[in-house]
Amino acid sequence: MSLMNGASRRISWIVRLGCFSVIAIALLELSFAEGNEDERPNVLLIAIDDLNDWIGCLDGHPDTLTPNLDRLAGNSLLFTNAHSQGTMCNPSRISILWGMRPSTTGFYDNYHQVRYEPEFLERYISLPRYFEKHGYKTLSMGKVFHVGTPPQFQIEGESPRNWLRGLDVRHHEKPDPWHASWDFGPQDYDESEFVDYVIADWAVDQLGRQHDEPFFLAVGFYRPHVPFFPPSGVYDSFEQAALPAVEDRDWDDIPKAARALTMSNVNIPTHDWFEENENERWKQAVHAYLACIRWVDTQMGRVLAGLEQSSYASNTIVLLFSDHGYHLGEKQRWSKFSLWERTTRVPLMIHVPEGVRGWTHKPVELLSIYPTLVELCGLPNNPDVEGASLAPLIRNPDAPWSHVAVSTLGQNNHAVRDGRWRYIRYADGAEELYDHDRDPNEWENLAGSGISPAHQDLIKRLQKRIPSINVEQRRR
């Protein structure tokens, strides 16, 4: 079965959303309580690790099942063209939590972590610390900061017991260099032992408590990060799992710089390995990834139900995002670590009490999370933050918007995404250009040989959006 096109999937989602309202699902019908206009809203920040756009409201995969994400989207402003600034966990989360680009901070990879930079932590203030500074109670559970445990003094947080559980059963033998977490398959132990269940339990408990100050509650779910280990009951609940479309000649017009950058991580399995035995590994991995999405959607739904049943339902902003996307065979590769659409595009939805419901396709960045929450909660601006607040779009999704989304992978490798085009420029000057109106899979590099004058003018315009390195703030 091939993947449905975006237009038909969006129509399908709108029809389903209408059915949800007919059934009278009341989830997150939030509004400020009368007489509480002067109260600052609470914030529920939900992070989902390695979730690409395979959710119902983003038309991402025909076999996905995400009713809770879809309901939240239906009661929020859904950003259908949202992109991560760092295309691996650590630089993405630092960019979100400090509101600065990787090209400004110099955090480009998963090994150079902010906890080892006391001068940076002293000079710049993270999003939760900024809320704490302005009178909020800050709480965290799970993977909000990279590796879970918050750096010192950043937030009152907890990290659940080792998420690579001793109960996990390994499924696949892999060559020695590959990362130990690369595995996939169902697990048979009790669902209450799964780390995301523990995280959801904690969040529901916090929402049921009495808090004397407004709270900033950050909840970070681990799945669908590798290993793709969903509960067996979820894995067995469906059989069909369509494989994403792949073009055999896709790499023919991709520059050497792209090959070197996106295939440099030797810990990642090759697409050839997944295609062995008539694509059996590929089918199992896609099935397990979809099952992990279904599982984390259920746990996220428990948190939203806990909010709805709490005394905070009418005065809480809910913002949900994923730190970056994920390849499952698209462009013949796996994992993140690329500047293509599958890695950079992410779910992003913001529910504001009495705010606009709907969607916008304007290009936005996760970098905007920090200034958006600051503005929505009436806090003073942080002058170090680089992102543009999304509040104008939340007030009016059709408001003028001149911004683009810029994603970075390593120093001087950037992708620029506007409403139609993706332009990639590598450190050696190599380029890619894709027209998403005609080529949503990014199979035809228009910046190859014989580029047209019109495309040359377009590239010049998009090149001007690439950030320069801030030498003063660069960490290395």
Image (cartoon, rainbow, N blue to C red):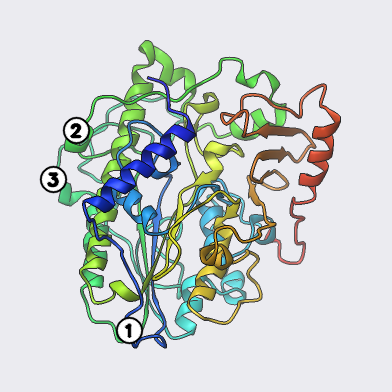
Work out how far the residue at label 3 is from the one at label 1, CA to CA, in angstroms.
43 Å
Instruction: Indicate the quadrant containing the N terminus: top left, top right, bottom left or bottom right.
Output: top left
Tell me if mark 1 has few (under 14), some (14-19) or many (20+) residues whose alpha carbon lies within 10 angstroms of its own.
few
* Residue 42, quarter of picture: bottom left
Q: Which residue is mark 1?
A: 34
At mark 3, the secondary structure is loop
* Residue at the spot 14% in from the left edge and 41% down from the top edge: 189
At mark 2, the secondary structure is loop
Q: Earlier in the sequence, mark 2 or mark 3?
A: 3
Work out how far the residue at label 2 is from the one at label 1, CA to CA, in angstroms.
44 Å
Q: Position of residue 259 (x, y in %)?
A: 65, 28
Q: Which residue is mark 2?
A: 237
Q: Which residue is mark 3?
A: 190
Which of these two is toward me, 308 or 196? 308
Kind of residue indicated by mark 1? Glu
Tell me if mark 2 has few (under 14), some (14-19) or many (20+) residues whose alpha carbon lies within 10 angstroms of its own.
few
Q: Report whether residue 343 is seen.
A: yes
